[in-house]
Image (cartoon, grey):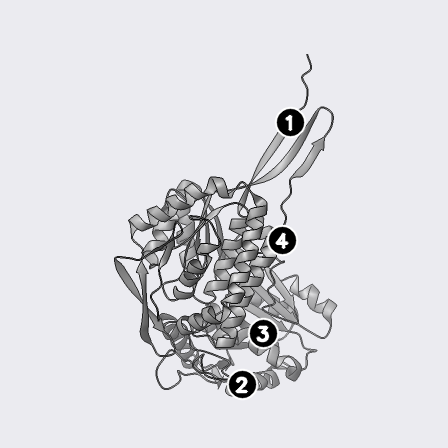
Amino acid sequence: MADLTMTIDGLAVCGKASLGVTNPATGKIFAHVPECSRDQLDTAMHAAARAFPAWRTDEGTRREALGACAEVLKSCAAELAETLTREQGKPQARATEEIMGAAVWFAHTASLEFPAEVLQDTPEGRIEVRRRPLGVVAAITPWNYPVLLAVWKIAPALLAGNTVVVKPSPFTPLATLKLGELLRDVLPPGVLNVVSGGDELGAWMTSHPVPRKISFTGSVETGKKVAWSAAPDLKRVTLELGGNDPAIVLPDVDPAAVAKDLFWGAFTNSGQVCSAIKRLYVHESQYTPLLEELAILAEAARMGDGFEPDVELGPLNNRPQFERVIELVDDARQGGAQIAAGGKPRAGEGYFYEPTVVGEIAEGTRLVDEEQFGPALPVLRYRDVDEALERANATHFGLSGSVWSGDVDRATEVASRLECGTAWVNQHLAIVPFAPFGGAKWSGIGVENGPWGLLGFTEIQTVNVRRRFDG
């Protein structure tokens, strides 16, 4: 494919070195991207700092620019989706959905308001609480939804008046670099800078003296390192980290009626979703029939190269994740768990792992206790709801969870007892741009999306005005 460049101060920038990008459907390198040097990162950060004073002054211009960014994504969706499928692996229809979703996020963010709050307004004086931009934001994004999650950070940061330096994952840098190229004609130089590189570049960004905020999406382990690196400079951080999300199916549910929704709540994007169902708790009265329904769906799911017609599931994105899923499922099998469907890599090239449903398994097994981030779902028995809740909450993770029942009020009450940032009822992965999304416990700090996410890119200034002197 055509060479892509970094975007620094509105210009196309190559690197002295490069990184290979692997197509996960083949396991072979098919493209190279620039590896940003420390000097180039300095240039990007200082360009963002220079652009900040002018960019912060005109809110109307910023709103118009975000609307224009949305239109660019819509007009180039096919091109971006093709690039995304090739580097990430997801089916082309799902890649197109991601690009169009990013356009929706740009457009919705452009409509958000953050007016001053008036605390007092009397003849003697006025007290207002205003929201001010922070400055330069360093955004570091993951490989599962690289474009959408970049826009989750870019759009609110820009609307609030900040400027941005964004680094995509080295596994999926191409579509984000292309996004930077497409937006050069929309945004002033320095307002959005896109750099590419490995983990070392991320560490340089979090410790760099220029940014006043780090917005990071990724693993808990790396999130802790980001927080540690940002602490000496008291940088603000938003961390959207891992999840080991439970779904609890109450005993009144018909297994056949919910199996499909539960399956896709777990296996969307081949399980590579931070808030996907990762542990499924089923009442003992419904356990066997629901396990069988899920196994049927797993066996029927169409897996293949994302460019093949009618493919529903693509490969895992990278070899380390592929090997991790193999290891976790093999460990469960050796521990006596029942492999109801799947349970092995697909023959041939690429990082394909069969959609796998695992029964007769319990806590203490790595597949249950750890975040698998792949197409392998453990299904666990429980006897009463209080027990299921206790087991579901007995984890350091707290991103999201769901409860399923024909009695919506009962399910809502149970869901309110989940220790997580988002609790769904009779659905999972229902993420929308106008609701906050973030985690409890080790699953994160702060939230993204909606006015709550927008305010995370601001700081408070109290303006206290005395209108007249006494003497």
Residue that numbered label 4 is attached to: 111
Q: Nearer the viewer, residue 362 or 236?
A: 236
Residue 298 as seen in the image, left or right of residue 315: right
Q: Amino acid at mark 4?
A: Ser
Whether pointer 3 and pointer 2 mark residues with C-beta atoms closer than 8 Å, the reply is: no
- Sort mark 3 into few (<14), some (14-19) or many (20+) by Cα contacts within 10 Å: many
Q: Secondary structure at mark 2?
A: helix
How far is the residue under mark 4 from the one under mark 2?
44 Å
Looking at marks 2 and 1 on the same chain, the residue that comes earlier in the sequence is marked by 2
Which residue is pictured at 49% across the width and 46% down the height? 162
Does residue 170 appear in the picture of this structure? Answer: yes
**Residue 274 location (% of width, % of height):** 50, 65
- Mark 4, mark 1: which one is toward the viewer? 4
The Cα atoms of the two marked residues, 3 and 2, are separated by: 15 Å
Residue at the extreme left of the image, as rendered: 16
Q: CA distance from mark 3 to mark 4?
A: 40 Å
Dot 1 alpha-carbon crowd within 10 angstroms: few under 14, some 14 to 19, many 20 or more: few
